[in-house]
Image: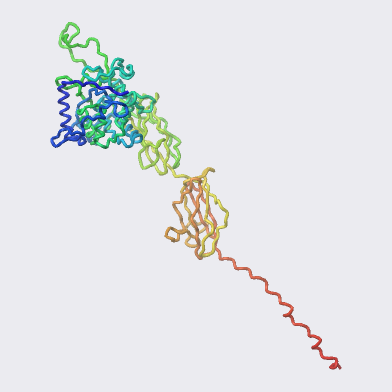
Amino acid sequence: MAAHFGRLRKGAASTAVAAAAVAALSASQAPGVATDSLGRQASGAQPSADASSSGQGGGDGAATGNSPYYTDLPPLKSPNPSPSSTIGTPVSVGEAEAGIPATVLDAYKRAESSLREAKPGCNLPWQLLAAIGKVESGQARGGRVDANGTTYSPILGPKLDGNGFALIADTDHGAFDGDSAYDRAVGPMQFIPSTWAWAGRDGNGDGKKDPNNVYDAALAAGHYLCRSDRDLSVQAQMNAAILSYNNSTAYLNTVLSWLEYYRKGTHEVPDGTGTLPSHSSGDTSPSGAGPSPSAPSTPESTPSGTPKPGNGGSTGPSTGPTAPATPSTPPPTPTETVDHLEDAGSGKLTATAGQDFGTKVAVRTETKAGKAVAKVRVRFLIVGDTDSTFAGGESVATVVTDSKGTATAPALAAGEKTGTFTVRATVVGRTLSGLDYAATVTARQADALTRTGDTELSCVPGGEFAAQVQLKATYKGAAAGKVAATATLVKSADDATENDKGPYFKDADGKTVRTLTDLTTAADGTLQLPKLYADDTTGTFLLRITTTGGATLTVELTVAPAAPATPSDPATPSSSATPSAPSSSATPSGSATP
C-alpha cells in the first residue's frame, strides 16, 4: 500500500537553524552533495519526482511518512578511534559518535551482504543504512536491543494525525504501532505500517517480519532504497533513494553527512552504550536542546502525581520546590550481565582434509557468580591461514545462547589446506576475553595400494616400457581420493635410496628423473604414473610408491636384451649328393676276366 503525504510542521525556528547547519556541514564534509560555486545546493540534491511519486512500483512516497528525524550532525573531527581505547576509557567526541552498537552494526552489515547477492547492481553500502538509522532512531536508541535484535520497547514516532505532521489514518489496526486511529512510524528505521506491509523483510531468519527488529528493519530499508533498479554508486540515484525515505532536502543533507562520516571509520561498541542524539526536526522548544516530544520515542506511562503545566508544578499544596524527577535506570540487558565465557564440552577439533569435523565448539555465557545467561549473542570466528569454513561456507557465525546459556557453533568443514587454525568465541556487544580453540586439518590418507594391471613391466636397454604403472589407493577399504603420493626408483628392497641407473621417468624438459613427488590420486583413488624409459643397464629394478598414511607398493621392472632368434635345422643332403656305386658299365668286361 502506498504511503500518504501531508504537510510538515511549519515555523519551527530550531528546524530552520538545523537545516542551515546541515547545509553548511554538507558543503564542507559531504562531497557526495552537489553544490555550486557559492556553496548552494545543486539540483542533484533536490527532491525528485521519484521521491514523491505514488505507486509501489516507481516510488511509494516516504517510508517514514515524512515523520520527524534527528538533526544532530556528526563532529568534524575524524571518527577513527584510538587502537588503545577500551570500554570505560574516556574517548573523544569523534570516537564516541563513530561507535555503533554491536548488534545494530551487525544488522547493517548483514543487510549489505544480503543485498549484494539479491541486488548486486544496487551497490548498497552498509554505511548508508547506518546513516539513516542514526537519523531515524539514534541507532535503535543507542543499541537497546536484545540478542535477536529486537528493541526492548517499541520506538514510535508521533501520531500522523495531520496536526503538524502528515495525515495518515490507521492502516494496520494498531498491530505495529499500537494506534488504531492513526499510523505512527515504527522501529529503528521508522517505517510507517502502510509501507512495512509490503516492504517488510525477515532479516534474522526467525520467520517473522518485525519493524521493531533491527535485522528485519535494516534489510527492509536496504530493499526499499534499492528498488526501481537503482545503482547507489551513482550520486543522483543515491540522492533519489534517500529522498524517497523522507522527502526533505535537509533530511538528505543530514543523511549524506553521516554517510560520509561513517565511511571515514567506525568501531563497534557494546549494545546499549551508543551516543544518543538530542535534536529533532520536529522540536519546537526555544532552545532546541534536549529530546523532542515528537522525535521517535519509547512509549512510557506517565506516573501519577507528575507536575503538569498550568498548575504551579504541583498536584497539591506545595511545601517547597519540587525536586527534579530522577530518570529510572533500565534493567541491565542479558548481554550486560555476562562476565565471562566458559567452555561447554567442546571436543578435540581434528579432521582430514575435505571432511567434516566430528565435534563442534560450544561455549556458555556466565555471570560473575557463574550463573548461565540465556539470550546472548555469541560470535564464532575462524582465524588463521585456512580454507576451512562453517557449514554454508562462512568464516563467521553468530548464535544466540539457549536457556542453559549455551551457544554451539555450526559444524566445521575442513578445506584442503592442512595445518592448524583457531576458532574464536566472543560475546557480541561486550569487550570480554574470548575463548580460542585450536583446530587441525590433517592430510588425506591411504592405508593400501594395489596395482590395477598385470601386464609385465619390461623393456630392452635404451628403450621405452610398453605399459604404464597403474595403481589404486584405499583407506579402510574405501577409495582414497586426493591422497598425496611419491614414486621412487630405489636401489634395492632394503635400500630406499634413489637409484642412479636403470629405468627412469622424464620431466617436462625431457631430462632424466628417478623420483616423482606431488603425485595425487584421483577422486576414485586411482593413479597412473608417467611413461618409464630404460638406459643401457640391464637387470631387475624396483619402483616404490608411497602415500600419506603409510601405504606402500613396490613394483618390479625388468630391463634385458631381446632374445636371439632360434636358428632353423641344417638341410639334409639329397641323394644326388651321395656317391653312387660303380655301374656295371664300369666293370671290366668278361673278356678281361681270366
Considering every residue shown, the one lying at the far right of the view is 594
Where residue 270 sits, quadrant-wise, is top left
Position of the N terminus by quadrant: top left
Residue nearest the viewer, comparing 512 with 418: 512
Residue 299 visible within the image: yes
What x and y, as percent, mark residue 408? 40, 30
Residue at x 35% of width, y 34% of height: 118
Residue 38 vertical placement versus 185 (above, below): below
Residue 30 vertical placement versus 328 (above, below): below
What x and y, as percent, mark residue 32? 21, 36
Q: Is residue 190 left or right of residue 385?
A: left
Residue at x 51% of width, y 54% of height: 544
Q: How is the image coloured?
A: rainbow
Considering every residue shown, the one lying at the far top of the view is 317
Position of the C terminus by quadrant: bottom right
What x and y, as percent, mark residue 547? 48, 49
Residue nearest the viewer, comparing 499 with 572: 572
What x and y, as percent, mark residue 169? 28, 17
Residue 147 visible within the image: no
Where residue 477 sits, quadrant-wise, is top right
Residue 249 vertical placement versus 173 (above, below): below
Residue nearest the viewer, comparing 369 with 292: 292
Considering every residue shown, the one lying at the far left of the view is 38
